[in-house]
Image (tube, grey):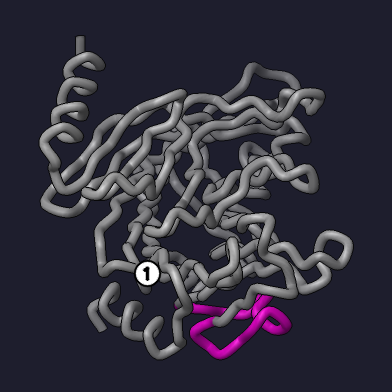
């Protein structure tokens, strides 16, 4: 009955032209603007890997597609070079728990995974629409049954800016499950990752950071914001990533793939990684929050514009 009422409400929203719309279909929650543009998909049901690939690479709880207003898809999932890449997603790579270390990023190693526990809430107010979902961070100890060690609330909200841009706010709230401390160990990548459309290579894309770094120098640097943009279907589009000053280890270290990644193609991967150079100790009974804003755009973005967006996001 609950799902029926929700579906009825969403259909009414669609029929009568409310500012934004949300529709569930084939295990994906689809968020659209008032004109029906499909902007964001949240995969709440498990997606299996391509045929012939180890079932360990199945996963839910990620965003794909992330589209511009003109319909260009920025994200990519399950590429053959990294089947564990899922558009916009946020696992942790080295997790210390009860004296052992687990990897929830490289899920093909079968040490753990992250499971979506479904969409808890769809929120709509004015021209803004979003959702709240739950993620269970699971480890696979060799001598025990699987164990959930972290509970995550994941929220996303999209709002219009103009005819070429909109914002997407992402908030991750982590809590320890049980009474044992969880340590997110320092490693070169972990946290919010973005795997770009396969059309982007070192020939037609670029990276610019708040500190003036580019694709050659960005990896390992600290940043308040990062622009990733390039050519898609004959014209430019991209993302501006904004990191909240309240995030752990801000300004955050970033992971950016080198220009010759993937046999010289230079595919694009960008990751805000607060634990790249520093452990993060999570204790029971506390909430740990990471906030980001994405500005999704058609065309190009200048660093001066990015700085204005960051100041608006942070109130500085």
Give yes or no for residue 28 being in the magenta stretch.
no
Q: Position of residue 157 (x, y in %)?
A: 29, 51
Give the x, y percent position of residue 146. Answer: 61, 21
5 shown above or below 188:
above
Q: Going by the image, does 23 lie left or right of 6?
A: right
**Magenta segment:** 209-224
Tell me: residue 154, above or below residue 195. Answer: above
Q: Quadrant of residue 38?
A: top left
Quadrant location of the C terminus in the rendered image: bottom left
Q: Is residue 210 magenta?
A: yes
Q: Residue at x 38, y 67 (%)?
A: 295
Which residue is located at x 36 percent, y 36 percent?
133
Q: 85 or 137: nearer the eye?
A: 85
Question: Which residue lies most toward the right here?
Answer: 263
Residue 144: x and y in percent read: 67, 18
Neighbours of disc 1 within 10 Å: few (<14), some (14-19), many (20+): some
Q: Residue at x 33, y 42 (%)?
A: 31
Where residue 259 sits, quadrant-wise, is bottom right
Q: Quadrant of the N terminus?
A: top left
Residue under pointer 1? 244
Question: Is 34 drawn above or below residue 303 in the view shown?
Answer: above
- Whether residue 6 can be seen here: yes
Q: Main secondary structure of the magenta part?
A: loop
- List x then y, in percent, for residue 136: 48, 32
Instruction: Please identify the residue farthest to the front as the structure is shown.
Output: 234
Left or right: where does residue 9 sit relative to residue 59?
A: left
Number of residue marks: 1
Residue 100 visible in rendering:
no
């Amino acid at each position: 009955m609950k799902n029926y009422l929700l579906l009825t409400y969403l259909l009414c929203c669609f029929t009568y032209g409310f500012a934004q719309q949300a529709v569930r279909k084939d295990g994906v929650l689809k968020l659209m603007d008032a004109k029906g543009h499909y902007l964001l998909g949240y995969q709440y049901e498990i997606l299996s890997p391509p045929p012939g690939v180890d079932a360990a690479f199945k996963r839910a709880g990620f965003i794909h597609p992330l589209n511009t207003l003109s319909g260009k898809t920025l994200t990519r999932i399950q590429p053959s070079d990294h089947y564990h890449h899922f558009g916009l997603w946020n696992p942790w790579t080295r997790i210390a728990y009860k004296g052992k270390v687990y990897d929830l990023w490289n899920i093909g190693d079968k040490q753990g995974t992250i499971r979506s526990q479904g969409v808890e809430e769809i929120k709509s107010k004015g021209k803004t629409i979003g959702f709240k979902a739950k993620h269970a961070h699971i480890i696979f100890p060799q001598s025990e049954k699987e164990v959930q060690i972290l509970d995550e609330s994941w929220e996303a909200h999209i709002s219009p800016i103009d005819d070429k841009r909109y914002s997407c706010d992402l908030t991750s709230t982590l809590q320890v499950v049980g009474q044992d401390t969880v340590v997110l160990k320092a490693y070169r990548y972990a946290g919010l990752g973005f795997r770009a459309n396969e059309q982007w290579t070192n020939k037609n894309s670029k990276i610019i950071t708040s500190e003036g770094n580019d694709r050659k120098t960005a990896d390992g640097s600290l940043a308040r914001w990062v622009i990733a943009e390039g050519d898609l279907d004959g014209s430019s589009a991209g993302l501006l990533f904004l990191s909240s000053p309240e995030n752990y280890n801000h300004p955050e270290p970033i992971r950016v793939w080198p220009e010759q990644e993937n046999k010289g193609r230079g595919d694009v991967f960008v990751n805000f990684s607060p634990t790249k150079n520093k452990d993060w100790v999570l204790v029971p009974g506390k909430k740990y929050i990471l906030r980001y804003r994405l500005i999704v755009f058609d065309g190009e973005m200048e660093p001066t514009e990015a700085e204005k967006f960051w100041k608006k996001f942070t109130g500085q």
